[in-house]
């Protein structure tokens, strides 16, 4: 990198976004993400409106070889003039999302360069990128009209002009590549994700693997009042955003890939991305006799009609209803604090018994199981019995929305102390409690008997209760009390997911054959098995029939099938598969 030199810091940070009107929702989400992380005042300006308001008329060459590929391809060259050739400016594309303080770019020294750009990794397969730039407005005396005329006269090719920024004499590729991660996101490293492939942008399609990331930010922006749900509906009504995005908001579904096929089909029937409408109109002009083209257009006619109607409206920039943008997002807001949880993990001494280096992965895997097996919704209230150092809590923090709620309790003081200190302040919807229950294996000095313990919650409080690796350490009378308490605190129709070591005929044969992880040779009661006689609560298994009877007595109906885990050595098609057996049940009484 070039040598750093002292220079006066200009404020506010001025960011110009290359865009057009139909991408304004993406611009708003981008602006929200910028202001969420930035410690300096920021002004974000859409170039299409800035150019229009300044009375700058950018020529459009007739030669197809040098025509702008997008309506905003040439807008960036107007930035120095828009700044009156003073100071500096940052240029971004609209299809981006920021995860770090953009002040990092603002404070980079020019050291004689006309502009600073991002260097792209050699193995990325993509050419150098100029969609993120810091522009030296005092040094670049660009007049966009003159530049386009030079382009028409053959001074540059289109590639040189737009893709290589040839009008700049000295380009310094010093911005780290994580400031333009093209269709990439690495948690804790990526500073800016660029949804550069138009065919898979999250506001246009449900297919982007990172769609959840952008939608989560949209949900956060709406929660904070930066964007209104009504604005999203208006953008959908204009034909600029996929209709399923409204369904996601209404049903609080963050990941668009979790939408049902029926909802996704409605997108294909009712919506054509604006950039495809433009191409279709061009094809009509070029070849109106093509039968195949006309058939395709008939199928997409609804979207095309919307596009033509929008294109025919006069003075669209002057008459549109503009929602005022918030001045600044409080950096200590709940959204910012919640974001910190995404990279948070307990110290190694706490994760040792909870997956170690796989601590986070196991938590996220279990949340996927809750969603798949127990139909967990983002707006539900959840109880985690035996929460440990927050393995499930940290994963659920990324799934539960503002209406969701999490409670957890455990018998280990160090685990609860860490959760109360690190998770609760960052996630206002969570609460952790220490309960001093006696367990000869985990808490031999506990004062409360497990068979008499009452969960510290009112009746019918939770939508979903789960216990993973809890009943595998409880003896029968303790298990019965816990299951009764689960039934008490669940709402009618609520679900519970509990893991076991279940013994049935097939499992018994597998144990005899030496295929199981545990042999359970000791049986203090006819329906209960232990692995270590001198430490009974270390590992406990149960007859499947006994467990089924317990559920029936407590007013539960088991959702078949039981998902048998890998511990027993029995082959099963259950996916995802865990080590222990998973039983999901519904409270029916």
Image (spheres, helix red, strand yellow):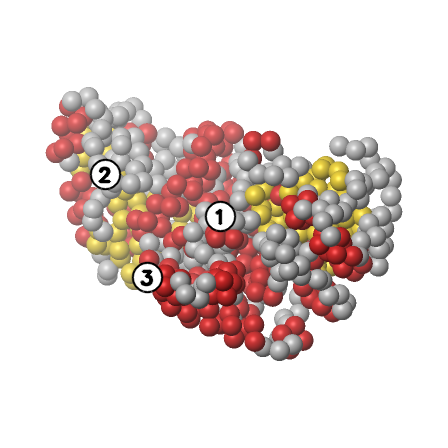
Classify mark 2: residues with Cα within 10 Å, few (<14), some (14-19) or many (20+).
few
Circle 3 — which element? helix
Whether residue 252 is visible here, answered yes or no, is yes
Left or right: where does residue 103 sit relative to residue 193?
A: right
Q: Residue at x 66, y 66 (%)?
A: 325
Query: Which residue was labeled with disc 1?
Result: 210
Instruction: Tell me if mark 1 has few (under 14), some (14-19) or many (20+) residues whose alpha carbon lies within 10 angstroms of its own.
Output: many
What element does badge 1 sit on? loop
| Residue 52 horizontal side relative to residue 359, left or right | right
Pointer 1 with pointer 3, Cβ within 8 A: no
Q: Position of residue 244 (x, y in %)?
A: 42, 63
Front in this rendered view, residue 121 or 329: 121
Q: Residue at x 24, y 60 (%)?
A: 588
Q: Nearer the viewer, mark 2 or mark 3?
A: 3
Rendering coords of residue 188 (x, y %): 58, 39
Relative to 259, 350 lies left or right: right
- Compare marks 1 and 3 and give the one earlier in the sequence: 1
Location of residue 362 by image quarter:
top left
Q: Which residue is mark 2?
A: 573
Residue 88 horizontal/vertical position (percent): 80, 51
Residue appearing at x 35%, y 41% in the figure:
468
Q: Nearer the viewer, residue 272 or 14?
A: 272
**Residue carrying label 3:** 262
Instruction: Assess whether mark 2 and mark 1 are in contact (beta carbons under 8 angstroms).
Output: no
Q: Secondary structure at mark 2?
A: loop
Residues at marks 2 and 3 touching, judged by CB atoms closer than 8 Å:
no
| Most foreground residue, 451 or 241 | 241
The quadrant holding residue 311 is: bottom right
Residue 153 rendering spot, x and y as whole percentages: 73, 52
Badge 3: few (under 14), some or many (20 or more) residues near its Cα, within 10 Å? few
Q: For the residues marked 1 and 3, what is the alpha-carbon distance in whole angstroms?
A: 21 Å
């Amino acid at each position: 990198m070039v040598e750093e030199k002292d220079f006066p810091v200009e404020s506010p940070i001025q960011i110009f976004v290359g865009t057009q009107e139909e991408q304004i929702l993406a611009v708003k989400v981008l602006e929200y993400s910028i202001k969420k992380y930035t410690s300096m005042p920021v002004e974000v300006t859409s170039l299409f409106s800035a150019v229009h308001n300044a009375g700058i008329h950018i020529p459009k060459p007739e030669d197809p070889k040098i025509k702008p590929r997008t309506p905003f391809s040439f807008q960036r060259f107007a930035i120095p003039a828009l700044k009156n050739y003073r100071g500096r400016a940052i240029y971004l594309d609209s299809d981006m999302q920021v995860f770090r303080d953009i002040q990092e770019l603002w404070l980079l020294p020019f050291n004689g360069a006309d502009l600073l750009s991002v260097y792209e990794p050699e193995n990325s397969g993509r050419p150098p990128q100029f969609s993120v730039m810091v522009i030296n407005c005092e040094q670049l005396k660009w007049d966009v009209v003159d530049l386009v005329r030079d382009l028409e006269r053959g001074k540059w090719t289109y590639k040189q002009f737009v893709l290589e920024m040839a009008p700049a004499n000295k380009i310094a590729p010093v911005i780290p590549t994580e400031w333009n991660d093209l269709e990439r996101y690495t948690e804790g490293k990526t500073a800016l994700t660029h949804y550069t492939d138009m065919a898979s942008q999250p506001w246009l399609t449900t297919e982007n693997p990172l769609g959840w990331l952008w939608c989560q930010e949209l949900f956060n922006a709406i929660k904070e009042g930066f964007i209104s749900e009504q604005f999203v509906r208006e953008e959908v009504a204009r034909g600029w955003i996929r209709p399923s995005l409204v369904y996601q908001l209404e049903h609080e579904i963050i990941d668009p890939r979790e939408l049902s096929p029926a909802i996704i089909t409605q997108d294909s029937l009712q919506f054509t991305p604006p950039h495809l409408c433009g191409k279709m109109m061009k094809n009509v002009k070029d070849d109106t006799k093509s039968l195949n083209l006309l058939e395709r257009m008939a199928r997409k006619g609804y979207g095309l009609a919307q596009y033509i109607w929008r294109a025919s409206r006069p003075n669209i920039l002057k008459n549109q209803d503009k929602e005022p943008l918030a001045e600044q997002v409080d950096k200590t807001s709940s959204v910012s604090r919640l974001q910190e949880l995404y990279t948070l993990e307990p110290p190694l001494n706490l994760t040792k018994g909870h997956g170690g280096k796989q601590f986070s992965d196991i938590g996220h895997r279990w949340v996927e199981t809750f969603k798949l097996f127990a139909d967990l919704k983002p707006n539900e209230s959840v109880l985690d019995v035996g929460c440990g150092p927050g393995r499930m809590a940290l994963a659920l923090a990324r799934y539960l929305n503002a209406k969701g709620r999490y409670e957890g309790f455990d018998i280990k003081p160090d685990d609860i102390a860490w959760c109360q200190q690190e998770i609760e302040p960052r996630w206002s919807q969570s609460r952790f409690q220490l309960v001093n229950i006696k367990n000869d294996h985990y808490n031999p000095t506990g004062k409360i008997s497990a068979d008499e313990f009452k969960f510290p919650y009112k009746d019918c409080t939770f939508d979903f209760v789960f216990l993973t690796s809890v009943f595998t350490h409880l003896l029968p009378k303790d298990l019965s009390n816990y299951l009764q308490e689960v039934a008490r605190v669940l709402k009618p129709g609520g679900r519970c997911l509990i893991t076991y070591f279940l013994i049935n005929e097939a499992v018994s044969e597998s144990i005899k054959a030496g295929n199981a992880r545990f042999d359970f040779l000791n049986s203090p009661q006819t329906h209960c098995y232990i692995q270590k006689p001198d430490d009974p609560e270390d590992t406990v298994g149960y007859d499947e029939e006994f467990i089924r009877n317990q559920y029936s007595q407590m007013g539960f109906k088991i959702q078949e099938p039981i998902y048998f885990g890998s511990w027993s050595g029995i082959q099963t098609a259950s996916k995802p598969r865990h080590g222990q057996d998973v039983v999901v049940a519904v409270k029916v009484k």
